[in-house]
Structure formats: C-alpha cells, structure tokens
Image: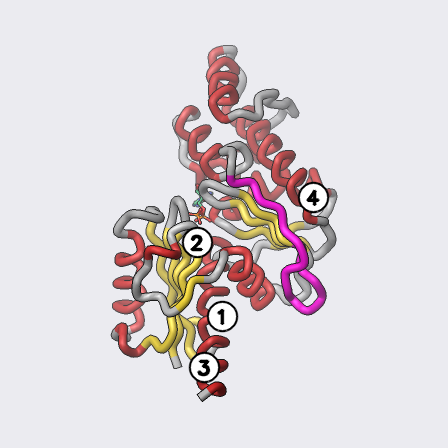
C-alpha cells in the first residue's frame, strides 16, 4: 500500500512516497512553495521516479503552510504533528525538535512516547528563519549552501546587534565596507539565528536528544552555533528538509489502517 506525504512550505515543496508505512520509495523537492506550481511538480516528480500512477496512492496527507490548497489530499495535518512523527520515526528517543524553515522557526518538546508535549513558534518575524539567512547570503554575494563552510573559517568572535532583518542587513553592509571578512560576518549571523531560535526552544523546554530539521539544518554553521548556545549536541537526520513530508506519509498510512479497521 502506497501513501504520499506532501509538505508545501513557504519556500520549498517536498514529497515522500512510502510503501506499507515503513519503506521510503522515493522523495522529491522543488525550491518553490505555497501558491506556486511546486505541489504539482513534486507530485509529478515522485510519481515518475517511482513508476506509480496517482491511483496507486491510497492516501495523501498534505502539511505545511500551503496544505489547504492541495486538492488531491485526503487530509491536512499540521507541520508540528508531521515533524514530530517524521523525526520520532528517524530518531527514536528524540526529546527536542528544532525546525528552521523558510519563513518560520518551531521548537517541539517530545515526550517518551514520541508525541508532542509542547511547542513554541516564531512565524511573525524573519529573524531566526531561513529568510534571514537567504537575505544575508544575497548581501554577501554567496548562497546558503556555502554559509556553513564559510563560518568554519572565521577567526573573530563578534556579534551582530540588530535582530531585525532589515537593520541587520545594513549592519552587514557596514561591516563589509569596514573590511571585516565574510567568514567572520557569517559566524556572527549564525550566532544571531542560534540565539533567537534557542530562546524559542527554551520556551518549549529543551532536553536531550535534540534533533534539528528543516532546510536550515543543512547549514552546518547554524547547527554548530545552536550546539554552542544550548551546550548540547544536535543530531541531524538524513534529509532533514524532508521530515515533515515523511511524517505526513507515515500519518497517511496510519489513517489508512484506521479507515480499514472502521469498515
Ligand atoms: P519551508 O518548509 O518553510 O518551505 P524549508 O524547511 O524547506 O522551509 O527550508 C527552506 C530554507 O532552507 C531556505 O530558506 C534556506 O535558507 C534553507 N536551505 C535550503 N537548502 C539549503 C542548503 N543546501 N544549505 C543551507 N540552507 C539551505
């Protein structure tokens, strides 16, 4: 039995097809999110990679910012539930999830049964989200996938004082014009994201094992800064940007079983 989880985020759309609730058949991602052709492109991608037709998929769960606009979905489920499910499946024993996406950051406290106990969320401000890093990478004439390696070369521990993205952008421009190296600026940017997100995490409650997900988990510089700020190791699952879609596919399988037993 095949199920599909689709995570239509603010910035990227991700899809996972599962067989029998335990075997990942295929995954796809496009770098456009809600309100774009992203969901159709991801659907086309997972179907063509797996050789399946849409009628082979027995249940579809949509999650993410754009979940209510995906008409093929049998059910919509919040990102908090889908991330908790996906991470608990990949990393049993997780107690804290830090998810940094394109336009928001969430932290989830997980109980010893793999269920969400509490959460905290920043969806009002770009600071501490992928958007902040996307803007800063643009100012520094680099790309987000280079930021981790750049900050590893830093030799000066300094801070960026502005939390607001617009003011921080001006501050970075001023640092650049004063000859501060890009690596040192990137380190300061990562520290600023880590401070903000760890403040959020402390609100929900932090305990080991800490797992980070979302596109920003691919930035080793942010991961190092969070580890330093929390003074705890942070585990990154394989494909951390896909955990919401994976959780959605797992929940789709559970819904299918429940529907069958109800008949
Ligand atoms: P959403 O679900 O809100 O669309 P994602 O969890 O998909 O967000 O994360 C998107 C963010 O991930 C982007 O804003 C970008 O900053 C970051 N990102 C994407 N790919 C990479 C990468 N290879 N390295 C570092 N950061 C990345």
Residue appearing at x 52%, y 22% in the figure: 168
Task: Say above or below: 140 vs 190.
Answer: above
**Of marks 3 and 2, the one in the foreground:** 3
Residue position for label 2: 64
Query: Horizontally, is 9 left or right of 47 in the view?
Result: right
Q: Earlier in the sequence, mark 4 or mark 2?
A: 2
Residue position for label 1: 251
| Label 4, residues with CA under 10 Å away: few <14, some 14-19, many ≥20 | some
The stretch of residues the image draws in magenta is 109-123
Q: CA distance from mark 3 to mark 1?
A: 12 Å
Which SS class for mark 3? helix
Task: Say above or below: 102 vs 207.
Answer: above
Mark 3 CB lies closer than 8 A to ligand 1: no
Mark 2 CB lies closer than 8 A to ligand 1: yes
Residue appearing at x 58%, y 51% in the figure: 212
Q: Earlier in the sequence, mark 3 or mark 1?
A: 1
Which SS class for mark 4? helix
- Depth check: 113 or 20 in front? 113
């Amino acid at each position: 039995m095949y199920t599909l989880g689709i995570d239509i985020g603010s910035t990227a759309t991700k899809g996972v097809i599962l067989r029998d609730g335990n075997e990942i058949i295929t995954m796809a991602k496009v770098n456009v999110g809600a309100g774009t052709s992203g969901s159709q492109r991801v659907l086309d991608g997972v179907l063509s990679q797996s050789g399946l037709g849409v009628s082979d998929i027995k249940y579809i769960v949509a999650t993410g910012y754009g979940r209510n606009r995906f008409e093929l979905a049998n059910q919509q489920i919040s990102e908090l539930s889908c991330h908790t499910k996906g991470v608990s499946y990949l990393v049993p024993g997780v107690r804290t999830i830090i998810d940094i996406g394109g336009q928001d950051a969430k932290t989830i406290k997980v109980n010893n049964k793999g269920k969400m106990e509490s959460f905290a969320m920043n969806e009002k401000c770009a600071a501490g989200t992928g958007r902040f890093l996307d803007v800063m990478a643009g100012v520094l004439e680099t790309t987000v996938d280079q930021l981790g390696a750049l900050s590893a070369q830093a030799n000066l521990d300094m801070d960026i004082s502005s939390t607001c993205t617009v003011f921080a952008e001006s501050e970075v421009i001023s640092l650049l014009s004063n000859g501060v190296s890009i690596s040192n600026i990137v380190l300061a940017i990562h520290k600023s994201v880590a401070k903000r997100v760890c403040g959020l995490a402390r609100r929900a409650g932090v305990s080991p094992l800490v797992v980070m997900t979302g596109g920003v988990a691919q930035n080793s510089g942010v991961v190092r800064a969070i580890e330093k700020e929390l003074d705890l190791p942070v585990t990154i699952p394989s494909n951390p940007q896909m955990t919401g879609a994976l959780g959605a596919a797992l929940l789709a399988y559970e819904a299918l079983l429940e529907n069958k037993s109800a008949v």
